[in-house]
Amino acid sequence: MTIESTNDNNNTKPAITYSECYQQCFCSDNLELMKTIESNTIDLIYCDILYGTGKDFMDYKDLYPMREIIEAHYLPRLKEMHRVLKITGSIYLQMDYRIVHWVRCMMDDIFGYGNFRNEIIWHYRTMKNDTKSFKEKHDNILFYNKSNDYTFNADDVRIEHTEATKKRYKRAKSGFTQGELKDKGKIPNDVWDDCYLVNNQFTRESVGYATQKPKALIERIIKASSNEGDLVADFYLGSGTTAEVCKDLNRNFIGCDINPRAVEITLKRLNNARS
Ligand SMILES: C[S@@+](CC[C@H](N)C(=O)[O-])C[C@H]1O[C@@H](n2cnc3c(N)ncnc32)[C@H](O)[C@@H]1O
């Protein structure tokens, strides 16, 4: 981070520019990396964790969906995440229906039931259907804080109102002009269906890593729950989507993956990302 003066006679406050935000990526087990991080230092943790599918994804092997296995893996790691997070920090953990109920209980114990903010549903579309039950088409993102004093930049994540809402406002003569309504937009609710899956064959964003997440999804989280120059962590880095978004948005970043290929892809992405 560099500090520069904004005027010639140096009377005003210095402006802070973030041209030197850093991105640190390690090839490591996340528990080992977290043990090396000082307490209360991270502003935002976003992790797209192991979902407990029991599958071999080529890039990594997932855990089995058994409660003892899930708890044995996550308990020590969630405790470390709590320790390294600042008292004003936020944490988002992404998973799906297989383990969300177990992780929710552990998070309530570690972060406190009162510090639970949202269970965000990320609804995505795929061609797959099921004739024996309703096909699962969403992930669950648990959002917690460490206290009631936390960053939430609602204005940075507003989205456009639907046409129907705009018409309703117009009819109700709510005091908003159409222009104001469009500019201001609405704060997204806890169901997100406007961030599209990164399909390995058809999306330019794809880097060919199993379970890669869309940048738009992570951008919304980072904009809402951190500011420029903050330190963001992702301890299940994968292809480095969080690291790339941090670089785009001038956030400092620390993260790791146990798979060397994941770190290799991440470093390549960071080299190609805007600076
Ligand atoms: C769901 S993927 C993350 C995908 C990522 N969000 C992306 O956009 O590419 C989970 C990642 O966690 C990594 N992982 C699994 N166990 C780990 C551990 N103990 N420490 C660090 N990383 C681990 C896997 O190698 C995998 O890349």
Image (cartoon, grey):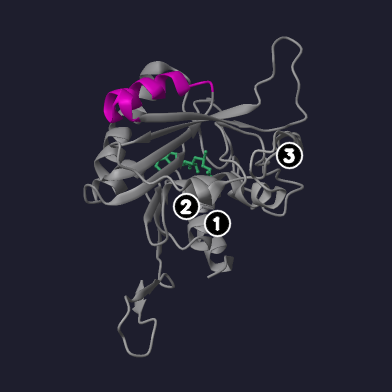
Q: Nearer the viewer, residue 113 or 153?
A: 153
Q: For numbered disc 2, what is the local secondary structure? A: helix
Q: Amino acid at mark 2?
A: Pro
Circle 2 residue: 260
Label 1: how many residues lie within 10 Å, few (<14), some (14-19) or many (20+)?
Answer: some
Is residue 100 shown in magenta?
A: yes
Q: Amino acid at mark 1?
A: Ile
Label 2: how many residues lie within 10 Å, few (<14), some (14-19) or many (20+)?
Answer: some
Which portion, as a residue range, is magenta? 97-115
Label placed on residue 265: 1
Please, what is the dominant secondary structure of the magenta stretch?
helix
- Left or right side of 79 for 152: right
Identity of the residue drawn at 72% across and 32% down? 125
Task: Give the residue furthest to the bottom.
Answer: 8
Is residue 196 shown in magenta?
A: no
Circle 3 residue: 170
Alpha carbons under labels 3 and 1: distance apart: 49 Å
> Closer to the N terminus: mark 1 or mark 2?
2
Q: Position of residue 195 (x, y in %)?
A: 65, 41
> Closer to the N terminus: mark 3 or mark 2?
3
Q: Nearer the viewer, residue 194 or 152?
A: 152
Q: Nearer the viewer, mark 1 or mark 2?
A: 1
Alpha carbons under labels 3 and 2: distance apart: 55 Å
Label placed on residue 136: none
